[in-house]
Image (cartoon, rainbow, N blue to C red):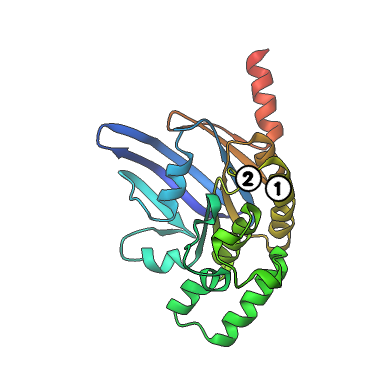
Amino acid sequence: MTPARVELIAVEKRFGGTVALRPTSLSIPAGATTALIGPSGSGKSTILRLLVGLIAPTGGEIRYDGVVLSPENLRGLRHRIGYVIQEGGLFPHLNVRDNVLLLGRHLKKSPEYLRERFSALCALTRFPADAVGRFPGELSGGQRQRVGLMRALLLEPDVLLMDEPMGALDPLVRAELREEFREIFARLAPTVVLVTHDLAEAADLGHRLVLLDGGSVVQEGTLEDLRQRSSDLSG
């Protein structure tokens, strides 16, 4: 069995009287991609926001390598987590280089480390050298997502969280970027949690799929596992 990098243990989230996530236990294996799928409002993005500490659970525990996520260790654990959202979540007044290096500079990483890391990430994501001085508004959708990924990978995180990273892209760009992401994941072998509405995308990138509905996990396993269970139920 692959050891769990992240665990949710009876985690639930309520916003007043609204239940966003029912008590959920989930084990996310190290070095693999777990794809969260399901309709809007099923709890997918809530799980990602809980994992990165943007919101706190109403109940239950979140553990990273066995350590319970808490207000006391949240800041340190966040530096081990990369987070990618639609359109990259870039700062419009910063160019590509400054967007990618922002956190590294804030943490006072050495200029040599940042220079070498930026160069390596541009090569990894095939980002054109002549575009590093451009601002987000001057980039294509695919380029913005590459920059968002570079920024998330800057500190070599243990866990990469991706919330509909290709949802706003046209089909051709989406297919191209999906191929690049698959190659990057194969090369780096990070622990990835990917939220997507696209089943083909989930099947292509995910080693394991988790289907949510109504704030609960309905099924989990490989694509073949889910197909077999669906066939068994329909039969």
Q: Amino acid at mark 1?
A: Val
Disc 1 + disc 2, Cβ < 8 Å: yes
Estimate the spatial distance between the alpha carbons at disc 1 and disc 2, rounded to whole Å. Answer: 6 Å
Between 60 and 141, the residue placed more toward the observer is 141
One can see residue 158 in this view: no
Q: Residue furthest left?
A: 16
Q: Is residue 20 left or right of residue 164?
A: left
| The label number, if any, that marks residue 173 in the structure image | 1
Quadrant placement of the C terminus? top right
Q: Which residue does the image show at 65% across and 24% down from the upper left? A: 229
| The label number, if any, that marks residue 189 in the structure image | none
Q: Position of residue 174 (x, y in %)?
A: 68, 46
Name above or below for residue 118 compared with residue 135.
below
Total marks placed: 2
User: Label 2, on which residue?
Assistant: 169
Name above or below for residue 196 compared with residue 56.
above
Q: Amino acid at mark 2?
A: Leu
Q: Which residue does the image show at 55% across and 86% down from the upper left? A: 111
Q: Residue furthest top?
A: 235
Q: Position of residue 136 (x, y in %)?
A: 55, 61
One can see residue 118 in this view: yes
Q: Which residue does the image show at 49% across and 56% down from the upper left? A: 89
Crowdedness near tag 2: few (<14), some (14–19) or many (≥20) residues, C-alpha within 10 Å: some
Q: Position of residue 52 (x, y in %)?
A: 43, 55
Name above or below for residue 129 compared with residue 85.
below
* Label 1 secondary element: helix
* Label 2 secondary element: loop
Between 72 and 39, the residue placed more toward the observer is 39
